[in-house]
Image (tube, rainbow, N blue to C red):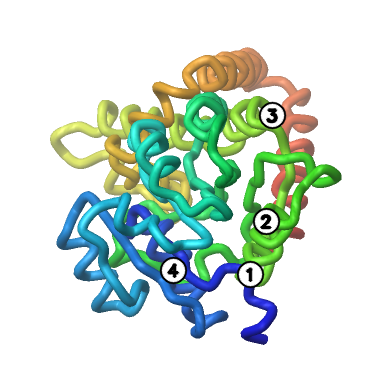
Amino acid sequence: MADSVPFRRIAVIGTGLIGGSFALAVRAHLPMVEIIGWDRDSASLDRAIARGAVQEKAAGPAEAVRGASLVYVALPVGAIVKSLALIADAAEPDALVTDTGSTKVSIGRAATECFRAKSSLFLGGHPMAGKENSGIESADAGLFKGAPYAIIANQNEANRQTRDFAALVGALGAHVVWCEADTHDWSVGVVSHLPQMLSIALASVVQDETDETGFPLSLAGQGLTDSLRLAGSPYAVWRDILFSNSDNVSHALNRLAQAVEYLQRNLKSAELEQEFRTANEVYALLQKRK
């Protein structure tokens, strides 16, 4: 098995929830692979070492990248964009550099510029997995199992390094989805960013409606808790996402507003039965993927 491992040394830039989970998953499946880490938060990096996610820690991103055949950049979108020039300069000539940013167009644009004259390769990526709690403390080797993992490339034109990374992601339990950057950003605007904004809006309404006696919140059951799970995610995680994908998120919110307006107009109409049927079908499709 060791002879078939395409990436012998991996640099994880950002050892939080996603970077830490990737490192833990690789360590579980491919213990012979060396993993070196770097994080802007030195305490987070120390905890990643303590958890066994990474074996070595680097003093900076350039030091982490040198000698690595795979560079896994798990930072917020803005930080990824800012780090690409330095990483491109430090990366080995045959290295594959991939990111986990939640939006892809702005990162892809920056990567094209930074890697234009380099022999290393940049590959956009995004694991559609996460938790409402961030940080290495929440990292989980099984986080990617059963989750879609977007790879920003044409599957039919993928080179060896890209196929090797897709195979690694698949070995970690994820389902690879090949797509273009603009398709990705439009899609996540609907299926990821819109649910987050809906959860925030719902929490705001509940808080505003709750009076000094504690009602109606004191009557809330598991349904509200389930609906507000995403509301536990901090703004720091979402700031760059919303900034970089504002057009798609705005479009999704407009579509939601239209759907809510329709529901409001038809509260006393049997026509809502069709809306429930459609919702039931979408939910059933999602359940089949588990």
The residue positioned 61% from the left and 70% from the top of the image is: 172
Q: Which mark is residue 6?
A: 1
111 or 177: nearer the eye?
Answer: 111
The mark nearer the N terminus, 2 or 4, is: 4
The mark nearer the N terminus, 1 or 3, is: 1
Q: Is residue 161 above or below residue 268?
A: below
Front label number (1 vs 3): 1
- Report which residue position mark 4 lands on: 23
The residue positioned 49% from the left and 47% from the top of the image is: 100
Q: Which mark is residue 112?
A: none
The mark nearer the N terminus, 1 or 2, is: 1
Q: CA distance from mark 1 to mark 2?
A: 8 Å
Contact (Cβ within 8 Å) of mark 1 with mark 2: yes
**What's the residue type where badge 2 is placed?**
Gln
Q: CA distance from mark 4 to mark 1?
A: 16 Å
Left or right: 86, with 125 as reference point: left
